[in-house]
Amino acid sequence: MSGHVIILGGDGFCGWPTALGFSQAGYDVTIVDNLSRRKIDIELECESLTPIQPILRRIKAWNKLTGKTVDYVNLDVAVQYHKLLTLIEDTRPTAIIHFAEQRAAPYSMKNSFCKRYTVNNNINATHNVLAAIVESGVDTHLVHLGTMGVYGYGTAGMPIPEGYLKAVVEGAEGPKEIEILYPANPGSVYHMTKTQDALMFYYYNKNDGLRITDLHQGIVWGTNTQETMRDEALINRYDYDGDYGTVLNRFLMQSVIGHPLTVYGCGGQTRAFIHINDTVTCIKMAVENAPKRGDRVQIFNQATETRTVRDLAEIVAEQTNAEVRYYKNPRREDAVNQLQVDNTKFLELGLKPTTLGNGLMQEVIDVAQKYIGRCDTSKIITDSLWSKEMEVDTRGSSTPYEE
Amino acid sequence: MSGHVIILGGDGFCGWPTALGFSQAGYDVTIVDNLSRRKIDIELECESLTPIQPILRRIKAWNKLTGKTVDYVNLDVAVQYHKLLTLIEDTRPTAIIHFAEQRAAPYSMKNSFCKRYTVNNNINATHNVLAAIVESGVDTHLVHLGTMGVYGYGTAGMPIPEGYLKAVVEGAEGPKEIEILYPANPGSVYHMTKTQDALMFYYYNKNDGLRITDLHQGIVWGTNTQETMRDEALINRYDYDGDYGTVLNRFLMQSVIGHPLTVYGCGGQTRAFIHINDTVTCIKMAVENAPKRGDRVQIFNQATETRTVRDLAEIVAEQTNAEVRYYKNPRREDAVNQLQVDNTKFLELGLKPTTLGNGLMQEVIDVAQKYIGRCDTSKIITDSLWSKEMEVDTRGSSTPYEE
């Protein structure tokens, strides 16, 4: 393994372990980050449960431990186009891994500022990367972290294919089979931006021949990877709040502090999941299996299992004796949905999934127990509502919801 | 006819005649414009062939002629969110008509600045309008000017339906019919932004119940409407340059100054057309036939006929004895395509199309002849290329292309 990778958003929850994973594997790594996620911590008055170290201190600790160097550039990808262009021209990376987007659906629905920030940041970040690759003339491979949520959790009851859908339409001479980008059905402003990203990938691939892989990722759980657990100074973020905390990590945290597990609605929503270790593994596989010039956008489903939220809560409750409590759902979504996901491509590349049964839930519980003193319990319930008319129903939804 | 309409981009080529059309019909009209199109004139060093008057002078002339008042607010819709929100709250418009986007495909491909400006302006403008309508709580109707170009000029050889496509997919229990947004296949960065707009309309309609009409418009030809021809101070823009001039207006201008008609490629590209008079008529029809709360996004094809570029050139050549000359195509597109457009909805609402045979081409020729002294012939050929590798072939493409 060798080559140079630029990791946009390399200070974040997925970005940081990915940066260390690539460094460990022998790549030269440049992290690009404007530290926006840390700044949102300040805005939301809620920090990572784990004591993450400042970016330069993290990088220094990694260097001390392994002798490996990771570069860091503070750059706002959505704004500082020419600095990004110069970086690509100077480093001529094998791959650019793009995590530089606002990634919480509840945050993207909080208010008009958050909606507008999410759209402006995510669309301009993605478009700047694409325009800069074209302008640089560097034949790099863009690997983008997308989301399973672009699919809208199932159409027509069939397993979700990997990005493209075969359909039969009426043609001039009778029925004709076509293959199209899976029809987008986003569930939040955040998810909407990822569907808009997909159109940009489609266009820049078609017009400029850019080599692009889009990873439609499930909900990530777990905290640390082999690399981030090597030293406390390398520890990864752990978000437990109602906006940024992903559902399983939130449940595990809640169980540790003795809070009931907060299921929204009846818990019949089915979601796809992946462990943070597998995220890093999949991204390495994607980089090492780049599309060739002339190939269409390569789309992988990056998820290893599906569960209902109620199932998850019951699994956690069983392990920890926590109580499960149902709350009114602040999201506008179907109460119950089926979801099957085709993830053949990563399995064929050799992925050995880390599933919920693998015992790694204990790692998350251990982390939560260790840092319990840093938890602000008032942050566990989201106050982001999906639309105005829900205000009457659910604002202050820490009162339980009776079905 | 009554009510209040806000016209975003109401100083532009479609916006200005629409503003006067609504004022004449009895609506209260507020024009919102940041004059960006006039500023691009300065950047491109090419003005409207017609001597358009400054916005306040135009409005004053209209008032003097008709006694009607049109309000004007200088506001950048993509940037000044709170000013837009306040305007919506204060005026509580019946409809908001949204033209506030960079609308030239060649300009959107000129260089990375123009690509980035087009994406940033168009996406943020549309999203700000949507977020502001939601935040205001005003039950208004958003009418957006989209483009036929989102369809990518034909899939599977069938007539282009009005926005939605019926398709059969494999479901869990065998084949299942679904109806989806027509799969987007944009041909430029500009067209790409309109496909991204469509996703925002889909989402805000689904999540917030916004009432939205998206008009997929063909290429506009003609200069003046009944209103703009009433006084020279009301005259509409006429773009003849390689970036902003639409194809028929360019041909007519070229014939007047004795320049060969500039057909790119073999001229086999089929396009959909509409006269500027019909644009205004259609937008009035759309406003007066608003979707109800709960309806999905209403999509109309706003085009009255289809022609190949070669056909158009021949029609103009016949009327004016101009020579037709073929140039290498700076666009990345199919050399030949079929295009049939379903425009049943406007026909059912009573539209009587102004077609190329209706004699209104003479109006454009008259305008071109009258202002011939204002023409800069060096601006007739575009130097916007669709991708880098075309540079060798076509830069300086004023040398004719031999097939």
Image: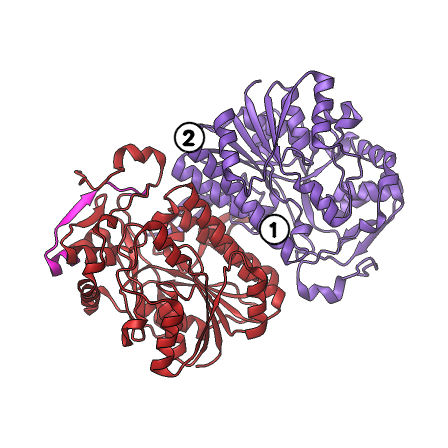
Chain colours: A red, B purple
Q: In which quadrant is the N terminus of chain A drawn?
A: bottom left
Mark 1 and mark 2 on one chain: yes
Which residue lies at the image location 65% right of the left edge and 48% below the top edge?
B338
Residue A102 at x, y percent in the picture: 41, 54
Residue B160 at x, y percent in the picture: 57, 43
Disc 2, SS: loop
- Residue A382 is left or right of residue A137, and the answer is left
Which residue lies at the image location 59% right of the left edge and 36% below the top edge?
B75
Instruction: Give, as a single range, the part of the protein colored magenta.
Output: A315-334
* Mark 2 surroundings: few (<14), some (14-19) or many (≥20) residues within 10 A: few
Which label was assigned to residue B374? none
- Residue B158 is left or right of residue A55, and the answer is right
Disc 1, SS: helix
Q: Amino acid at mark 1?
A: Tyr
Q: Is residue A88 above or below residue B62?
A: below
Q: Is residue A328 magenta?
A: yes
Residue A394 at x, y percent in the picture: 26, 37
Q: Which residue is mark 2?
A: B137
Q: Chain of mark 2?
A: B
Observer-nearest of A202 and A398: A398
Which label was assigned to residue B117? 1
Q: How many marks?
A: 2
Q: Chain of mark 1?
A: B
Residue B322: image quadrant is top right
Residue A313: image quadrant is bottom left
